Amino acid sequence: MKALHAPTTFRALRPEDDAEVRRLLHSAPMDGAIRLRLTQDPSYFAATGIGGAEEILLVAHQAARLVALGRCTVQDRFVHGQPRRCGYLAHLRLAPDAVCRGALVRDGFRAFAAALASRPAELYFTSILDDNARARSVLERRRPGMPVYTRIGGYATFVLNAPAAHTAPFLRERAETALARAGFRIVSGASLGPAGLADALNRLARAHPLALAWSEALLGRLSGHGLGVGDFSLLQEGARCVAAFALWDQRAFRQITVDSYQPPLGLLRHAYNAYATLSRLPRLPPPGGTLRQAFVSPLLGAADVTGALPAWIDYARAQAGERGLHYVVLGHGTGDAARDRTFGALRARRIASTLFRVAWDFEPSANGAAPTPPWDPEVALL
């Protein structure tokens, strides 16, 4: 019996697909208690190749309609303390009206495998929201033709309020005072210059599995995506750099919008917001609004300065408030007891995800073992 639907075709994303692929992102929010739309306006391509990253972008068509998107971003990241080519799988999206969805997913992964096999990375990984039960059930099921998804560990994303612009200077001063009393001082990344900043970041990033490997050239390229050396702040103890962060506002090319709230959260949103106001927790914005937020990313620190993290994050919140932002977003690979306790004490809304290693048939067996958890990739690049 002949199929009653048009065949599915896969190919690389082209510039003429821009409007269609952006419509797909708007129409396919991520499932969860809070349904989020991760969009890339005014051009999808403006948010690709960030920092010169190598990317594979594939789309699927049914009856000349774009119905699926997949993306793999390959960058140098730290694995066992050394830079290695690592691929991150993202934007696996299906249109609501796509047909034969199971076969579409399976054949889409086969197309990805063919595109990646000619120049494979040494490690592939992805993250999936714990609330996204549909994606987890599909991707964790070991089907023929699909890569193997292996749970590696947890990843927590925290959303914190930024202070109002008129109170931000007071929070900044309080954070600076607390850090100074602990023996730390804050310097701007601009004072080190690109080469010195890259060196300082790499010294810290080596201890964070899957953290980005930095270079002077990478910093120069990131300036085109709104991240300059002046957006980095470093914490020093004497001559030693012990922590660093950047406040990265990506709204010019990448937006986060609340699509809707699932029951019972949607019904309780106003009551929760009243409680959040009294408790200084992030309020839940109305559906349809783009969040005025920036990422605190990268967020790097030596193991012996975890106690300074709350004041360090307050300093980042103050910077965001001074820029007129409402929220800051930061990420943390879970699994280290001391860091988990410190992050868990933040007055923030916590969104739980799981990190997966993705293993393909074409990967050479000589790649070696994956790094020991917790994996700690930058939230701004997930």
Image: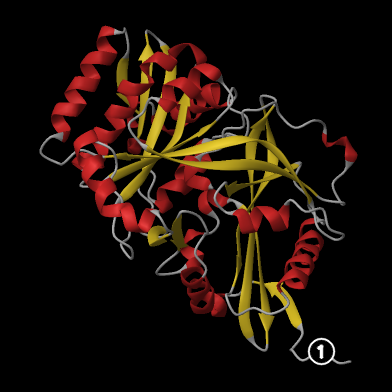
Give the camera-side residue of 248 and 280. 280
Colouring: secondary structure
Nearer to me, 89 or 184 = 89
Expressed as whole percent of the image width and height from the top left, the position of residue 177 reads: 21, 15
User: In the picture provided, is 38 more to the left or to the right than 251?
Assistant: right
The residue that appears at 17% across and 23% down in the rendered structure is 173
Say what secondary structure mark 1 lies in.
Answer: loop
Closest to the observer, 109 or 249:
109
| Rendering coords of residue 310 (x, y %) | 34, 22
Quarter occupied by residue 146: bottom right
Is 284 on the left or on the right of 340, as rendered? left
Q: From the top left corner, tell me how far across and down residue 284 is, in percent.
A: 31, 51
Using residue 131 as the reference point, say whether residue 247 is left or right of it.
Answer: left
Mark 1 highlights which residue?
3
Apparent side of residue 154 relative to residue 200 in the rendered image (left or right): right
x 66%, y 52%: residue: 136
**At 38% from the left edge and 60% from the top edge, which residue is drawn?**
257
Classify 10 Å Cα crowding around label 1: few (below 14), some (14-19), many (20 and above): few
Compared with 213, 70 (above or below) is below
Residue 59 in view: yes
Numbered-mark total: 1
Tell me what residue is drawn at x 81 percent, y 63 percent. Answer: 114
**Residue 180, placed above or below residue 332:** above
x and y, in percent, of residue 345 in the image: 38, 24
Query: In which quadrant is the N terminus drawn?
Result: bottom right
Q: Is residue 212 visible?
A: no
Establish if 187 lies above or below 160.
above
Q: Amino acid at mark 1?
A: Ala
Quarter of the image for residue 95 reads bottom right
